[in-house]
Image (spheres, rainbow, N blue to C red):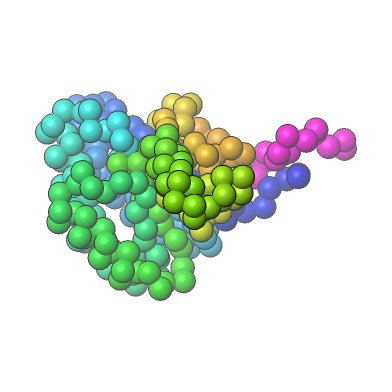
């Protein structure tokens, strides 16, 4: 309890690509492409700052509801990201992992994601988690179904299921919970992101849309996090 140190795990809800483009009189696709460049920039700077884990919300389970043309554009940018950026991340010793259910994506995108995981799997630098077709409720549901199946087979005693056991069955198994979640574009909601893992995370909202979020923006958000007092349910300390 007390003033936080630099966070190990930073999570970001990358919001506002479409609004960024619309404010400039551009099609929304320009904002999504600018958002990809912002991700490259922030991944590099996170590694330079010594952040150990960076988890970004790239494509939610709800994003499939967007117009078909926009969804296809997002999938194309995802394909391009894996094709053009993973080699750069590998050189930086970044380890890449996808959170979420990849089955609905085209087969080539699934192969690219798996290739990225295999290529970078032994790297010892920043661990970058990209949440794709991810939703916190769906993640918890999958974990519960997995544990229920094990219990029916007699592989686990339901009485032995505790928080640590459930956490080991989430998409984020093996990762520490994020200390801070940053959301861009001024919105103040989790949007179904890391619902279990965010229980005690500090929430920092910044006004910039994601394409404008740069190295200084990240440092400012981390400075805001350091000003917080993390009490984890305890009372404020007397000075």
Q: Quadrant of the C terminus?
A: top right
Q: Is residue 176 above or below residue 238?
A: below
For the point 15% across and 49% down, which residue is it? 106
Front-most of residues 108 and 201: 108
Question: Can you give x and y, in whole percent of width and height, for residue 99 in the image?
Answer: 37, 50
Which image quadrant is residue 200 in? top right
Front-most of residues 236 and 20: 236
Q: Is residue 94 above or below residue 154?
A: below
Front-most of residues 216 and 224: 224
Asked if residue 212 lies left or right of residue 71, the reply is right
Front-most of residues 56 and 92: 56
> Taking the image as drawn, is residue 40 in sight?
yes
Q: Is residue 69 above or below residue 112?
A: above
Q: Quadrant of the N terminus?
A: top right
For the point 71% across and 39% down, which residue is it? 232
Residue 237 is inside the magenta segment? yes
**For the magenta stretch, what is the residue range?**
219-239
Asked if residue 105 lies left or right of residue 120, the reply is left
For the point 51% across and 58% down, which residue is it? 174
Residue 158 is inside the magenta segment? no
Question: Can you give x and y, in whole percent of width and height, for residue 162 in the image?
Answer: 61, 46
Residue reaching furthest to the left: 69
Question: Can you give x and y, in whole percent of width and height, for residue 19 in the image?
Answer: 29, 28
């Amino acid at each position: 309890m007390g003033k936080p140190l630099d966070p190990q795990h930073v999570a970001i809800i990358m919001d506002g690509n479409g609004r960024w483009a619309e404010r400039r009189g551009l099609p929304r696709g320009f904002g999504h492409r600018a958002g990809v460049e912002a991700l490259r920039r922030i991944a590099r700077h996170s590694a330079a700052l010594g952040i150990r884990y960076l988890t970004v919300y790239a494509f939610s389970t709800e994003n499939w509801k967007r117009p078909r043309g926009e969804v296809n554009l997002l999938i194309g940018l995802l394909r391009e990201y894996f094709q053009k950026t993973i080699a750069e991340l590998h050189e930086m010793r970044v380890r890449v992992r996808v959170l979420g259910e990849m089955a609905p994506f085209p087969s080539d995108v699934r192969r690219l994601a798996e290739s990225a995981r295999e290529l970078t799997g032994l790297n010892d630098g920043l661990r970058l988690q990209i949440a794709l077709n991810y939703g916190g409720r769906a993640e918890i549901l999958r974990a519960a179904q997995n544990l229920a199946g094990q219990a029916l087979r007699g592989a686990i005693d339901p009485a032995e299921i505790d928080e640590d056991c459930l956490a080991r069955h989430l998409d984020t198994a093996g990762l520490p919970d994020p200390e801070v979640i940053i959301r861009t574009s001024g919105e103040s909601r989790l949007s179904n992101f890391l619902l279990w893992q965010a229980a005690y995370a500090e929430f920092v909202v910044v006004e910039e849309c994601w394409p404008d979020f740069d190295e200084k923006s990240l440092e400012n958000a981390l400075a805001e996090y350091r000003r917080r007092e993390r009490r984890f349910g305890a009372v404020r300390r007397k000075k």
